[in-house]
Image (cartoon, rainbow, N blue to C red):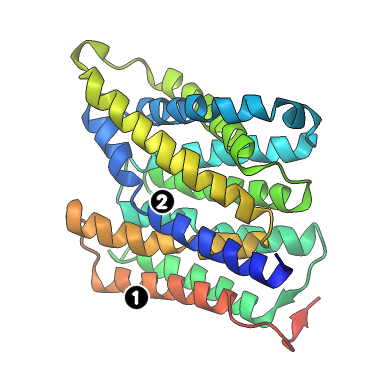
Amino acid sequence: MDQAKTIRLATVIVTLTGVLWGLYWMPVRAMDGLGLLGAWGTLAITFAAAIILLPFAMHHAAELCRADFWALASLLFGGAAFAMYSISLVDGRVAIIILLYFLTPVWSTLIARFLFGEETTLTRLLAIIAGIAGLGIFLSADGTIPYPRSWGEWMALISGMMWAVATTGMKYRPSVKPFPAAFVFACGAAGTSLLFALVSGAPDFSGLNIAPVIGTAILAGGLWWGASLSGLMWATARLEPARVGILLMTEVIAGTISAAIFAGEMPAAQEILGGVLVLTAGILEIWPERKEPAFA
């Protein structure tokens, strides 16, 4: 497959992954409703994902042993970022959590510019401005200063920064095959979830209905953390970090619409405007960049 086709396929995979992850709040909150509160629900999901992906990791054990250290570290760090994002969805409104996480393109572009000396094109610069402006409008919809207010919102913001670092490492270090990469990713997430779960204290396991808990964990772990992230790992290594971050903004649309329909989290007019600006940032980012001025 030539490079142009590879980039197009990777772009489609990242976009569809964003849509799927826009619905991820459903199994996370379902686990919370079943009695696995806070980080415990994410721990169950990511542990199930690691178990599901273990056979693939064992099949590629020799490759994992030879893999670049920083590539594996980037995968573990990315898993930690996603775990924090997953935990943050329990607290706060879905759309706000998602948009806070999606300041990722700002951090990715800054990393590419100042650490790797890459040029910043005009459309990329405009995309960053639109994204930040949209987020500011969204957070100030109630007339207050736009900043994260709950622990969930702060976790979403920090996890976005961490994801930017992780995707940069995945881009610039030798790639690991998708399924074993997803296993390492899930291990990073499970370990991070365990730390947060232990800090939060043990839930009351006596009232748990084990069957739906296990079923939800297997479904979310297999579909979101297994299948979709395997595709994302393949695509991330073939796209620029900032492009990955912005293409995943399809998650904003899916998350906002699904939360409005199923959780009654209807966005206000000002919040819709902010969301439109964030999506505009995504359009600007994928706009053809040939013959554009660059800011070296």
* Closer to us: 89 or 58: 58
Residue lying furthest top in this view? 206
- Residue at 27% across, 62% down: 257
**Which of the numbered marks, if any, corresponds to residue 21?**
2
Q: Is residue 269 left or right of residue 181?
A: left
**Which of the numbered marks, if any, corresponds to residue 205?**
none
Asked if 268 appears above or below 85 in the picture, the reply is below
Q: Is residue 16 left or right of residue 186?
A: left
The residue to which callout 1 is attached is 273
Residue neighbourhood size for the residue with mark 2, other residues' Cα within 10 Å, grouped as few (<14), some (14–19), many (≥20): many
Q: Can residue 146 be seen in this view?
A: no
Image coords of residue 40 (percent x, y) = 37, 25
Residue neighbourhood size for the residue with mark 1, other residues' Cα within 10 Å, grouped as few (<14), some (14–19), many (≥20): some
In this rendering, the label closer to the viewer, 2 or 1: 2
2 or 1: tag closer to the N-terminus: 2
Q: Can residue 55 be seen in this view?
A: yes
Q: Is residue 32 left or right of residue 192?
A: left
Image coords of residue 161 (percent x, y) = 59, 50
Image coords of residue 185 (percent x, y) = 58, 36
> Residue 60 appears in which quarter of the rendering?
top right
Instruction: Measure the C-alpha gap from mark 2 to mark 1.
Output: 22 Å
Identify the element where label 1 is drawn: helix
